[in-house]
Structures are given as C-alpha cells and as structure tokens.
Amino acid sequence: MKTVVKNIDRTQLKSEKSKGIIAQAGEILRAGGLVAFPTETVYGLGADGLNEDAAGKIYAAKGRPSDNPLIVHITEIKDLKKIAAVVPGEAYKIADRYWPGPITMIFEKTGEVPYGTTGMLETVAVRMPDDEVAREIIRAGGGFVAAPSANTSGRPSPTSAAHVKEDLDGKIDMIVDGGRVEIGVESTILDMTVTPPMILRPGAVTKEMLEELIGEVSVDRSLIDADSKEPPKAPGMKYRHYAPRAELSIVEGRMEPVIREINRLAEKKIADGYCVGIIGTDETAKKYENGIIKSIGTRTDEATIAGHLYSILREFDEERVDYIFCESFPTEGIGSAIMNRLMKAAGHHVISV
Ligand code: AMP
Ligand code: MG
C-alpha cells in the first residue's frame, strides 16, 4: 500500500488546500481506511470506530494485541449518548471543564460500538481532542474515530509525523502532518463505570485537578505498586510498551549522587565496549562526562520533559545505543505521567542512590 503524506498548515485550516486534505482524510475514514493525524497528546491512527472491519485494520497495522481496546474520538458532547449507555453527572462536569482536552473517560457502551473497537469489552473509552486538525478530520470522517497512538505496538508513541512514517509507512492510507504535538504523552484515562472513578493511566489532567472538580478519585493499584499481582485495569497498560531498543535504567535519589552514579555506570559500560546514552536535563546535562548526552527539558517546566520524552527514546534507537541511563523526576502534576511512561519504558528497572 502506498501511504500518502500531506502537510497541513494549521494556521490556514480554512484554505482550499487544507480543506482538500481534510476532505480526502474524511473520505478514506468513511470508506473504512486508516489515517494518522496529530492530536494534542500524540499522533493518532484513526479508523471509523463504528465499523468493525475498519477498527480491525488498526490492530493489523500496529501489530496491536486484539484485547487492547481503542479510544473513540468525538467532537461534540451530544455525540456521547450514541456510544455511551450510561453517563454519570460527574462525567458531564469533567467534560465541561476538560473537553476538548487530554482526558479519556470510560463508560458502558451502546450497541452502536462494535466489540472489534472495544477489545470485546462491554465498555467504551471516549475522548474529545482539542487539536483543530484532529477535530476537522474526525468530523469529516463521520464523527466517531477510533484512534490509538500511531506507532508500531511496543515502540515509543509518535510525537511527529516523521515518527509515524518510521513505523507505519506502507501500512496505512494516509498521514496528515500537522507538525509536532503539544503535550507529548497520552491522555489521562478515567474509568467512570466505578465509584469513585478510577485513573487507569495518568496524563496531563491530574488526580488533583479531577478531585478538585468531582471529589474522590482512586488510582489503579497496578500504577502505584509495580509488584502488584493484579493486572492493570486498562488492558494496554500491561504491555511493556513505550520501550526503546536499548536497556533503560532510571537512577533516583538526590541530584549530585545521581549524576555521579550515572557517570560511573556510563564509564563502566563504555569501557566494556557498549554505546551509552544519558538522559539529563538543562540543569544537569553539562555535568555528564561520557556517552551520548541529551537534555530532555528543564526541571523548572516539566511540560518540556513530557514533550521530549518519546522523541529522545526514538533518537537513541536511531543512534543504536545499548544502554540508557536516565534521571528520575518528581511525580507531582504531569510528573506522574512522565514517571509512569519512563518506568514502563525501563521495565521498572530503577537504581536508587
Ligand atoms: P492508546 O490509544 O494507544 O494510547 O491506548 C489506549 C489505552 O486505553 C490502552 O491502554 C487501552 O487499554 C485503554 N482502554 C481503551 N478502552 C478501554 C476500556 N474500555 N477499558 C479500559 N481501558 C481501555
Ligand atoms: Mg499506544
């Protein structure tokens, strides 16, 4: 299959050229094809979420396990009723404040949603993205677009169209290139079918933000306790994805000892003939001595760290490093999403100093 790649200028969405690209993407989606497009979190791989065959193509293109359900993306709150059988009042409060935006809610599904979209579950995950390019494409595609991250399963999520091309060129119909994404980590997932609602995946909308709005919110135990015997409640969270090809270790502790330990570990691996990558920050990068050193962002603005997380892991893949050593980050705010993804990428390999 030839994958068409189109650049869209998000400042000129009403231009004839942009309208043409959106119409083409919409046609492909309505005909049951696959289109990758930017959202504010990461690039999504879209298919008609109400068409079982179309959703099935997503699994094939990504190599995604069939029990890992898809998130259905909508653009209008009135459309929620068509796919969600029960919508509690708190969900409307959350939608009111944070939709469009980086939070996904889980509801009991209606008969409109095929089991091929929900991984055989009786529930459906729904999000209303904020990115204008995504919204135009979803509307053009019929309004209910299933879209997981547009990467090969097991690789870091894509934050640029180039990442999507690396993984899916020749496997999907179209890539709409709308530049780099804004946030860089996937949406918060909140299960609204339980009381109190439960966070199944941390994202940019944090537990604190939700509790301020609706009161108590719980967190899936498997997110807090790495040794938890219970499987994660979001089926996708049990897979070791977001993973780079190299072995990633997170070094935690006070800053100076962490830097010393990373320098020591890197020197040792390099002496053994390995290629080593180091993930530091603007504040610390200069203090590393050996290996390929990258800054992931600044500690004074953790959003910059979320924004570079996946692209740094992909860069190290390209540079064929064998080992990556990474600093650890505080888990407040977006930090809990950052550490969740880093810990998974590292297979929970942490070195404490
Ligand atoms: P992705 O879109 O690739 O970021 O992955 C979607 C995530 O949402 C995966 O971790 C899924 O397991 C999770 N998810 C989607 N639908 C449901 C659902 N109905 N119940 C629980 N988790 C879900
Ligand atoms: Mg994903």
Image (spheres, grey):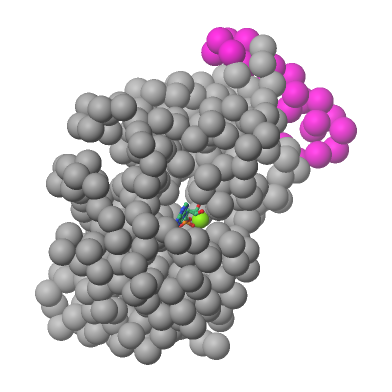
In this rendering, would 70 be left or right of 179? right
Q: In front: 277, or 69?
A: 69
- Quadrant of the image occupied by residue 262: top right
Q: In front: 148, or 210?
A: 210
> Magenta region: which residues?
253-277
In the picture shown, does residue 317 fall above or below 347? below
Q: Is residue 180 visible?
A: no
Residue situated furthest left in the rendering: 14
- Can you say which quadrant of the picture contains the C terminus? top right
- Can you say which quadrant of the picture contains the N terminus? bottom right
- Quadrant of the image occupied by residue 62: bottom right
Q: In front: 111, or 52?
A: 111
In this rendering, would 209 be left or right of 125? left
| Residue under the point 45% across and 24% down | 331
| Residue under the point 24% across and 84% down | 23
Main SS, magenta region, reads: helix
In the picture shown, does residue 252 fall above or below 227? above
In this rendering, would 278 be left or right of 19? right
| Number of numbered tags placed on the structure image | 0
In the picture shown, does residue 273 fall above or below 212? below
Whether residue 83 is in magenta: the answer is: no
Q: In front: 306, or 120?
A: 120
Whether residue 265 is in magenta: the answer is: yes
- Quadrant of the image occupied by residue 50: bottom left
| Residue 312, image x, y percentages | 53, 44
In this rendering, would 273 be left or right of 104? right
Q: Can residue 252 be seen in this view?
A: yes
| Residue under the point 59% across and 75% down | 60
| Residue 205, image x, y percentages | 31, 38
| Residue under the point 22% across and 64% down | 81
In the picture shown, does residue 332 fall above or below 220? above
